[in-house]
């Protein structure tokens, strides 16, 4: 029997603003099983990041139920059940790369030996061996994002939440990091929730693609990918890939038309 990492049922979230209530999520139901790579795609304002923040316990739903690792999202946050990678790397400029990766381990009050081991191993996972003593400004944007991923992996959470981590990077760097992320996922077996605006990126990375519609944010389609888990970049030229991308595009269009 598959282990459920995220389970949402009829999830609603309404923000109270000076201009009145704004419904960010409406009746969102979704299951994410252990080891899945799930991408969320949709136009700006469709609730992709809001859903991720609900899973992280950073926003409180106003309706429905949400379980993360079999507990409430808030309990999962306190249990450090997930790592979070933001669109900007968010590295502290006064800390070295090793120091940035070490930060959550310091909060956990691990031994010096254990902190050193985890920093070494997670930097190796993202191909940043030898950069531990460098500062963020000495690294490219892509390398900074890899360091951010290493920090999120350092405390070995089952779930990795990624909010458009490659959105600000050029296409060549983005392609390379997509390949590296798939390889990282294969090595670690983590469960990935990934927000993107890119159809090719969503199709290339995912075992499941969640298409969202705006105003209010809701799921318009969930596409289970038939692609093999090992995916060279040129798989994007295959008829199977193009067919999935077409379905995603049609789902986005239908959602916009219904908004």
Image: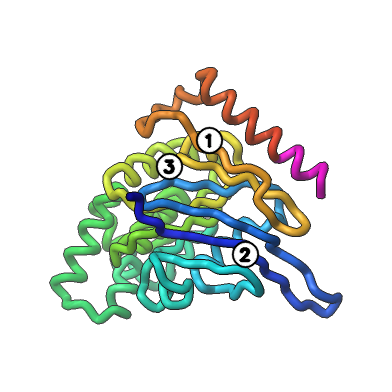
For residue 240, above or below residue 81: above
Residue 13 lies left or right of residue 59; in this view the side is: right
Q: Which mark is residue 203?
A: 1
Q: Secondary structure at mark 2?
A: strand
> In this orientation, does residue 220 appear?
yes
User: Is residue 101 rendered magenta in the image?
Assistant: no
- x 45%, y 63%: residue: 84
Query: How is the model colour-coded?
Result: rainbow
Q: Which of the labelled discs sits on residue 11, or is there none?
A: 2
Q: Earlier in the sequence, mark 2 or mark 1?
A: 2
Query: Which class describes the residues within 10 Å of circle 2: few (<14), some (14-19), or many (20+)?
Result: many
Callout 3: SS: helix
Q: CA distance from mark 3 to mark 1?
A: 15 Å
Which of discs 3 and 1 lies nearer the camera? The answer is 1
Q: Residue at left 76%, top 78%?
A: 16
Nearest the camera: 15 or 258? Answer: 258
Does residue 138 appear in this view? no
Q: Which residue is mark 3?
A: 177
Q: Is residue 48 left or right of residue 174?
A: right
- Residue 140 pos. (x, y %): 44, 50
- The residue drawn where x is 81% and y is 50% is 259
Magenta-colored span? 252-259
Q: Give coordinates of residue 11: x percent, y percent.
A: 62, 64
Sequence-first tag of 3 and 2? 2
Secondary structure of residue under mark 1: helix
User: Which mark is nearer the camera, 2 or 1?
Assistant: 2
């Amino acid at each position: 029997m598959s282990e459920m990492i995220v389970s949402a049922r009829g999830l609603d979230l309404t923000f109270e603003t000076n201009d009145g209530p704004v419904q960010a999520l409406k009746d969102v139901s979704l299951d994410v099983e252990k080891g899945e790579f799930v991408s969320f795609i949709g136009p700006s304002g469709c609730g992709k990041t809001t859903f991720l923040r609900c899973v992280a316990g950073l926003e409180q739903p106003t309706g429905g139920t949400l379980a993360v690792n079999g507990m409430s999202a808030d309990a999962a946050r306190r249990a450090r059940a997930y790592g979070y990678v933001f669109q900007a790397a968010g590295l502290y400029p006064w800390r070295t790369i090793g120091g940035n990766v070490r930060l959550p381990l310091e909060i956990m009050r691990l031994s010096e030996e254990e902190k050193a081991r985890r920093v070494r191993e997670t930097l190796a996972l993202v191909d940043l061996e030898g950069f531990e003593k460098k500062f963020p400004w000495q690294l490219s944007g892509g390398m900074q994002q890899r360091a951010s991923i290493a920090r999120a992996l350092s405390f070995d959470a089952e779930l990795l939440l990624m909010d458009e981590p490659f959105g600000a990077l050029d296409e060549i760097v983005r392609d390379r990091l997509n390949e590296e992320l798939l390889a990282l996922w294969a090595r670690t077996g983590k469960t990935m929730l990934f927000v993107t605006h890119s159809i090719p990126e969503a199709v290339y990375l995912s075992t499941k693609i969640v298409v969202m519609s705006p105003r209010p944010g809701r799921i318009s389609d969930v596409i289970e990918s038939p692609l093999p888990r090992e995916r060279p970049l040129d798989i994007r030229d295959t008829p199977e890939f193009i067919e999935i991308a077409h379905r995603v595009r049609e789902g986005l269009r239908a959602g916009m038309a219904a908004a």
